[in-house]
Image: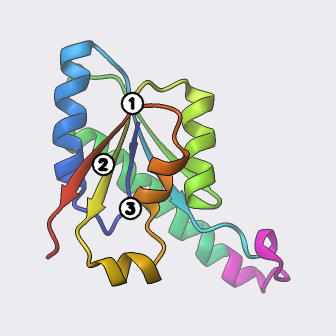
Amino acid sequence: MVAVDFNDSIGELMVYADSLAAKYDSKVWIVHVADPEPDFVGYQPGPQYIRDLKAEEYREEHHNLQEVCKNFLSEGIDSEALLIQGSTVETVMQEAKKLQVNLLIVGTHKHSFLHNLLQENVSMELLKKSEIPMLTIPIEEI
């Protein structure tokens, strides 16, 4: 399973996923966790047009994930794109467990100690909570 954020260099992660899937004849799940619905986090639902805009945004993100599968994975590799709403770390861990994946691939950014101390680092949180092997790929800052 490859956990992606559209801010990451998805191509770098997919090179590894493609290579490993081809070598071990494995399925690849590409997972992106979208922000939860506002009422999930304690807010009242907004006007219908806001909900419609959010739904369109989710459709576009899911389409982009499907394009990632098509463009970055070799022809014979079984793959599936999943867009799931929720809290990033918990959602990735739940989905990995549900799908019974045997490897989680994530990108990591090189930041200073102070930055890592002050900012949430999803990759590090996944590493702390993961019960399955992880492959972390350093992502170059652009």
Q: Secondary structure under badge 2? A: helix
Q: Which label is found at residue 67?
A: 2
Which residue is the site of mark 1?
A: 103
Q: Amino acid at mark 2?
A: Glu
| Residue 43 located within the stretch drawn in magenta | yes
Q: Amino acid at mark 3?
A: Asp
Closer to the camera in the image, 88 or 59: 88
Q: Is residue 29 above or below residue 24?
A: below
- The residue shown at (78%, 86%) is 47
Closer to the camera in the image, 58 or 49: 58
- As drawn, is 16 to the left or to the right of 124? left
Q: Which label is found at residue 32?
A: none
Q: Residues within 10 Å of mark 2 (few under 14, many from 20)?
A: few
| Residue 73 visible to the viewer | no
- The residue shown at (55%, 46%) is 129
- As drawn, is 126 to the left or to the right of 111? right
| Magenta residues, start to end | 39-51
Residue 58 falls in which quadrant of the image?
bottom right
Q: Which label is found at residue 5?
A: 3
Residue 37, image x, y percentages: 71, 69
Closer to the camera in the image, 29 or 100: 100
Of the image marks 3 and 2, the number of the one nearer the N terminus: 3
Q: Residues within 10 Å of mark 3 (few under 14, many from 20)?
A: some
Residue 27 falls in which quadrant of the image?
top left
Quarter of the picture containing the N terminus is top left
Residue 57, image x, y percentages: 52, 70
- Closer to the eye: label 3 or 2: 3
